[in-house]
Image (spheres, helix red, strand yellow):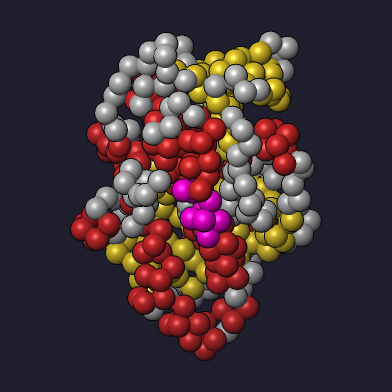
Amino acid sequence: MQERRPTVSQPHIIIAGGGIGGLSAACALLQSGFCVTVLEQSAVLSEVGAGVQISANGARALFALGLEKVLQAVWCEPTGKEVRMWNSGRTWKLFDLGAISRDRYGAPYFMVHRADLHRLLYEAVKALAPDAVRLGSRCMGFTQSTDGIAAHLEAGDDVCGDVLVAADGVHSVIRNKLFGDERAEFTGCVAWRGLIAADKLPDRLRRPIGVNWIGPGGHVVHYLLRSGDLLNFVGVVERRDWQLESWTTPGSAEECLADFRGWHADVLLMIRHIATPYKWALLSRQPLPHWTRGRVTLLGDAAHPTLPMMAQGANMAIEDAIVLARCLADSKHDVAAGLQRYEKARLERTSRLVRAADDNVKRFHNPVLGSIEGAEQYVQREWQEPRVKERYDWVFRYDPVASPI
């Protein structure tokens, strides 16, 4: 996307939320010539200490924003992904990455620390418009008319513009104002996350491979970050005594170890080296039939919160950002029509990804994985190459920069 400086005649886009999705949208819109204000509730802009997987579809979007070179300095590009059995450690190849991803999909698949990606997006926005991000500004509602929209801040003042984009996350205030309080259902799963200094681990756990351990009632994902200095750990287990949906609640290594009792020694070794494990309940939500009303629309987790089992939450938000900017750029004299085009372009794909993540819960946690014979047959069936391509090719091949809008 070519950079163009905003002019006073361009529509003013207000974005509620300064996370990865909100900043991606700000960057894309600024590069398309819009005036942008990002309203971020936190007094200090920061992200949680966790990893994120960026597949080719997300990489294309980030590269379109001009971030390829700076991302290369902080990412880890794995050579592939593999599936391992929860108790024996037996390993099957899931799919190749590295050069294969570049050749097949035209872009790399890489892992990056969320804080690094967030920082680079923030720096890109500031370079385009130094005052675009307003910290300590929580959007609590809005009033719209045929002439514009006013975002109402918690402090009592308003920010006026032409469009309001709600990128305020899974607990979106704006979404609830538009469509009412949604019903989120507890999945019966609790997730653990943590970071490990890679030099504390043996070489077999420091390979440039994304690993997915699968077992009856749980799974574990781990991969390297920051040029191999850190290992990102995410473990999901079925239990019903914890239903708080927060990424920042600390647990203990003892509790996490108890949740994975009987798992392979490598899994337990990683848990013992997590400085502070955090836990959160996984809640499932049905895809919304609509995101947009008038001058207001949703983006990222506010629009399509998803379980992490497809590793596509961040990718979807970044895709949204590129497509939103394209649709508004093509409809500058009718922003409401541009928002409708954006919703139409994104609704089917994101809904399909939400459902695919739900399906993977059953796939990763299947009870047949409890027996050696059942596990062998199940993995051979579910992870044979045609089945894997069926599940992932359509995800990775999508190009938000060139897809029809």
Residue nearer the viewer, 276 or 159: 159
Residue 109, horizontal then vertical, whole percent: 33, 52
> Magenta segment: does it hold 40?
no
- Magenta span: 345-352
Residue 366 in sight from this viewpoint: yes
Q: What secondary structure predominates along the stretch shown in magenta? A: helix
Q: Residue at x 36, y 54 (%)?
A: 398
Image quadrant in which the N terminus is located: top left
Q: Is residue 137 above or below residue 107?
A: above
Q: Is residue 213 above or below residue 66?
A: below
Q: How many marks?
A: 0
Residue nearer the viewer, 162 or 389: 162
Asked if residue 277 lies left or right of residue 313, the reply is right
Asked if residue 154 lies left or right of residue 297, the reply is right
Res 391 quadrant in image: bottom left
Residue 171, horizontal then vertical, whole percent: 68, 39
Q: Residue at x 24, y 53 (%)?
A: 106
Q: Residue at x 29, y 24 (%)?
A: 3
Residue nearer the viewer, 276 or 217: 217
Q: Residue at x 52, y 56 (%)?
A: 348
Residue 256, horizontal then vertical, whole percent: 64, 54
Q: Is residue 293 above or below residue 273?
A: above
Residue 15, horizontal then vertical, whole percent: 54, 26
Residue nearer the viewer, 184 or 401: 401
Residue 258 in sight from this viewpoint: no
